[in-house]
Image (cartoon, helix red, strand yellow):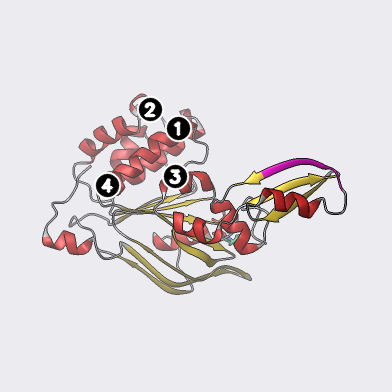
Amino acid sequence: MSVDDESGEAALASTRPAARVRGLRKTYGDVIALQGLDLDVMPGSVVGLIGPNGAGKTTAVRCMAGLLKPDSGDVGIAPSRTPGRSPVAIAAQEIELYPGLPVETNLIFFGHLSGVENAEEVLAELAVELELGPLLGKLPKDLSIGQQRLVHVAAAMVAVPDLLLLDEPTAALDVGSRETLFAAVARRREAGVAVLLSSHQLQEVEATCDSIVMINHGEVIAAGDVDDLIGKHGGGQIEMTVDGTVQVVQGDDIAAAIAQVTAGGGRLEAVNVIKPSLETVFINLTGMRSMDVEAS
Ligand SMILES: Nc1ncnc2c1ncn2[C@@H]1O[C@H](COP(=O)(O)OP(=O)(O)OP(=O)(O)O)[C@@H](O)[C@H]1O
């Protein structure tokens, strides 16, 4: 991948958001998908956009890519650091590849489409990085869904964008491909790329992102550094089964929690300590049981 020289201008650019979203609102008929979303993605950082199904993540990412027009609000995308090149690339949730073109031709085409003149060279490096070699000569329809997903993400990376938008990029990927992909994301962060990663796989977000924006019903409910948020809102939970009924106590004092749920004389059958995490941040802030449920 190409990395700009750290000229004065580039250094200044690195202090400004690659994407600045303010007051983004989008409705579909009666459905309010986004109600005033704010977020920044700085160069050299990975921001996780997380929330349950239907929270508004895809709508936000598509508005940021210019694929969807918001009802109101602003999306500011910094100009490309490389003249003639598109500053932003998206790997949308739906896999979009040209079915009649081999993978290699697809990827070179996506690179050229974004103004990357040396797309062939970029692809040669990317193919090694994402282990795409055996796939290059095949048609998309002859790939597994996971392989198609990886090629689809590669189509965004071959554009060498300053802002990379990834909407659920690991859907259908096996563990090895996920690790390969996150290593590639980490390399781009090191090279100063701004990455927005939409996901509801909280463990991978915790492991990959510098900061998160957590949304529910199209509204930001928490934003900031992952560890800070977990420290501030992620208080653990103790799940206990008493006489066949599951009871949940907030906190991490196991003895006190057991005393509380067995005070009436019930028989304690199981104890499950849930460690503070982004999941417990979500549960504590929304009162919902898990992020794995549809926003209602
Ligand atoms: N084209 C559409 N027409 C009508 N409603 C829509 C449309 N697209 C999205 N919605 C609704 O807008 C809300 C936000 O959807 P969106 O796809 O942005 O959520 P999401 O967080 O990406 O969900 P998921 O994790 O399931 O992909 C949901 O209630 C959804 O049903």
Residue at the spot of label 3: 207
- Specify whether residue 108 is in view: yes
- Callout 1: helix, strand or loop? helix
Could you tell which of marks 1 and 3 lies nearer the N-terminus? 1
Task: Compute the Cα span from label 3 to label 2.
Answer: 28 Å
Task: Compute the Cα span from label 1 to label 3.
Answer: 23 Å
Disc 1 residue type (three-letter): Gln
Q: Are marks 4 and 3 in contact (CB under 8 Å)?
A: no
Residue at the spot of label 2: 135
Q: Which residues are magenta?
A: 266-272
**Left or right: residue 55 compared with residue 167:** right
Which one is closest to the eye, mark 3 or mark 2? 3
Disc 3 residue type (three-letter): Ala
Task: Compute the Cα span from label 4 to label 3.
Answer: 16 Å
Q: Which mark is residue 190?
A: 4
* 95 to 79, vertically: above or below: above
Residue at the spot of label 1: 147
Q: Are marks 1 and 2 in contact (CB under 8 Å)?
A: yes
Between 194 and 281, the one nearer to me in the picture? 281
